[in-house]
Amino acid sequence: MSIFRRMNAIFTFAIKNEILDRKKFSSPNLSRATESIKRNALSIDEITKVLEIARTKYKITHYACLSLLFLTGMRVGELRALQWETDIDFENNVIHINKTKDRYGSRTPKTKNSYRKFPMNANIKSILLDYKKWYDDVMETYKFRNPDGYVFITYAGDPIGERYLKRIIDLICEREKITHFTPHYLRHTFVTIQLSNKIPVSTVAALVGDTPETIYKVYAHSFEKDEVHASNLMDKIINLSSFKESEEIKK
């Protein structure tokens, strides 16, 4: 809370002196701040529950977006920037990730590592094919609202907004009494699962558009678990008794 008070004083001063626009800022909700800091990935049970809730109780766009973020480790901006014509290749089972989308529109990624081709597995392809059928029905009426052919749209035919997924996750967590998480947790979950299953760091980095160095730095906790596992493995190989000097040596 001391950090919040200090930041609040800074923003108050900036707004009072017209350095910042008052309308663009509001007090942040810190009720779950500590909890969020401690957690950065979901367990298999948690993600399974979230996706099943989204599939059975919410809309197809909610389910498809959350599933794709989990199955690919994509960033939200990359997901929003996907276009059917240029990025979704059902013939070769590949998703082309070569741009991101924020409040200012679609743009190229900041680093060359973000340019990549993600291989579609059976789950990814099935979800996208089902979503494409629904999408085509919606676009018969609302095509004018999405002239660029972005993949993920609302029920009114508009491309999903910057805070679309955060709002639906907040709603799911509140209604279903699920511990709060953000869309980025799904990326962390993907990487953590890959690392825990001994997928090489270079491969994981290529899949999520990062460098191996970043993976080592951000996901150090996963490597620590592997190190503990590697150490414990030695116990299974050999069983050593406690040291005990013989009586002859003592003499």
Image: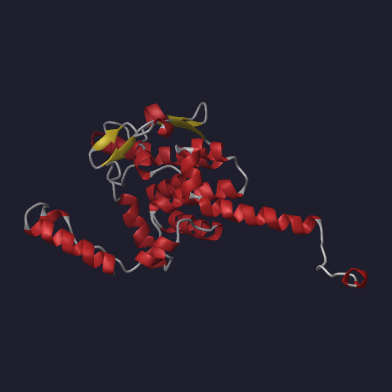
Whether residue 4 can be seen here: yes
Give the image quarter of residue 112.
top left
User: Which sits in the foreground, 11 or 124?
Assistant: 11
> Residue, x 60% and y 56% (percent of image)?
225
**Split into 4 quadrants, where in the image is the C terminus?**
bottom right
User: Which sits in the foreground, 243 or 177?
Assistant: 243
Query: Measured from the top left, where is residue 209 in percent x and y?
Result: 45, 37
Side (left or right) of 243 relative to 55: right
> Residue, x 62% and y 45% (percent of image)?
198
Give the image quarter of residue 23.
bottom left
Residue lying farthest to the right in this orientation:
248
Query: Measured from the top left, where is residue 227 in percent x and y?
Result: 63, 53
> Residue, x 57% and y 47% (percent of image)?
195
Residue lying farthest to the front in this orientation:
251
Query: Measured from the top left, where is residue 231 in percent x and y?
Result: 69, 55
User: Which sits in the foreground, 30 or 119?
Assistant: 30
Tally the numbered discs: 0
Whether residue 95 can be seen here: no
Side (left or right) of 163 relative to 213: left
User: Which sits in the foreground, 145 or 70?
Assistant: 70
- Compared with 126, 189 (above or below) is below
